[in-house]
Every structure is written in C-alpha cells, then in structure tokens.
Image (spheres, rainbow, N blue to C red):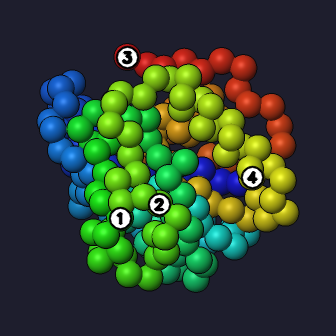
Amino acid sequence: MILLRHGQSEFNVHIAATRRDPGIADPRLTEYGHIQAERAARSLWGERIARIVVSPYSRALQTAEPVARLLDVPVFVHPVVRERYGYACDIGTPRSELRERWPDHDFSNIDEVWWPSDDEPADSVIARAAAFRAEMAVRPDWSETLVVSHWGFILCMTGQNAINGQWLRCDPTEPAPAEIIWRS
C-alpha cells in the first residue's frame, strides 16, 4: 500500500515557527498544503490505486480530494488511521459537520465525536497501526490502497518520518518496524 502524509496545515506552519501549540482545532490545509496535495495526486497518477482510505481530519480529507478526483477512485473514511492525539489540532470535527463538508463520503462508520478526549500514549498509536497492518494484510487489494494519514501514524507503520505531502510504500505482510523513535 501507499501511505501519504497530508499536505501542510495551518497548525504545521505555526508549530514550526513557534514550537508552541497554536490552539487550532482540526486545521485545514494552507495554500501550499493544497499545492502539495495536487502534486501528490499527479505523482500517484501511474500507481495502481483502486481505493483511498483516509483519516477523518479535515487536512487529510482535503489532501485526498485531488487524488480521488484525478484517479477516480472511492474514498473510505477510517478513524484508525488518524493522528496521535496530543495537540489542539487533534481535536476533530464532528461527523455531522464532516458530512456537510464532504457529502460524497460515507461517515456512517464513525461516531459523532470520533477522536479521543485525552492525550494518547505512543503505545496506543503503535497498537492502532499494528491492528490496521493486520487488517490490511488479509485484504486482497492492499497493494492497490492509498492511505492518507498523519506523521505519527505513518511513523508507526513504516518507522520513517514523512514530511507533508510525501508518500511512502508499506507492505503490511512484512513485520512492523522494530523500533519507533518519536522526535521531541
């Protein structure tokens, strides 16, 4: 499968400049983030992608839009591929509002409030990634699946730090990374 980190968000810009949480809940993509999403879509043009699995965060949904449009593939919203909950940006948007913004997507498999209420320990994200890896490993279409996700989740899946708009390959039938190094 291919794992794509969402494009640059409003949160990414502020945290990079100040190293302090700016308090932006469920930030959207910046103009540059939209450019990164379009670039990712074009770079994925030659790949065999039959479906997109996307996190319910707005930045991930916005990143998936140009890919889905260009490749004409269905989008499946799956909260297990969300980011590690630890900043204001990890407060999501309620399901009812997401349905209004993205009426073509099916949000029926998520709760109205689908994100955690407390900081999420690293072990929890590693466990979510392991569960998703196992779920994907038994699917016959895993090699044709694009997952639009986040830094922490992609780190747990691959052991690699993906930058905004970058995509990496991941074989879920192979062992998970032996060690995950969280940067401070």
Per the image, the residue denoted by label 3 is 184
Q: Going from the N terminus, do you reach mark 3 or mark 2 first?
A: 2
Residue 129 position in % (x across, y down): 62, 38
* Residue type (three-letter) at the residue carrying disc 1: Arg
* Residue type (three-letter) at the residue carrying disc 3: Ser
Q: Which mark is residue 110?
A: 2
- Nearer to us: label 4 or label 1: 1
* Residue type (three-letter) at the residue carrying disc 4: Met
Q: Which secondary structure, mark 4?
A: helix
Q: Is mark 4 in CB contact (under 8 Å) with mark 3?
A: no
Q: Which secondary structure, mark 1?
A: helix
Choose top left, top right, bottom left or bottom right for residue 75.
bottom right
- Nearer to us: label 3 or label 2: 2
Q: In this image, 114 relative to 1: left or right? A: left
Q: Is mark 4 in CB contact (under 8 Å) with mark 2?
A: no
Per the image, the residue denoted by label 1 is 95
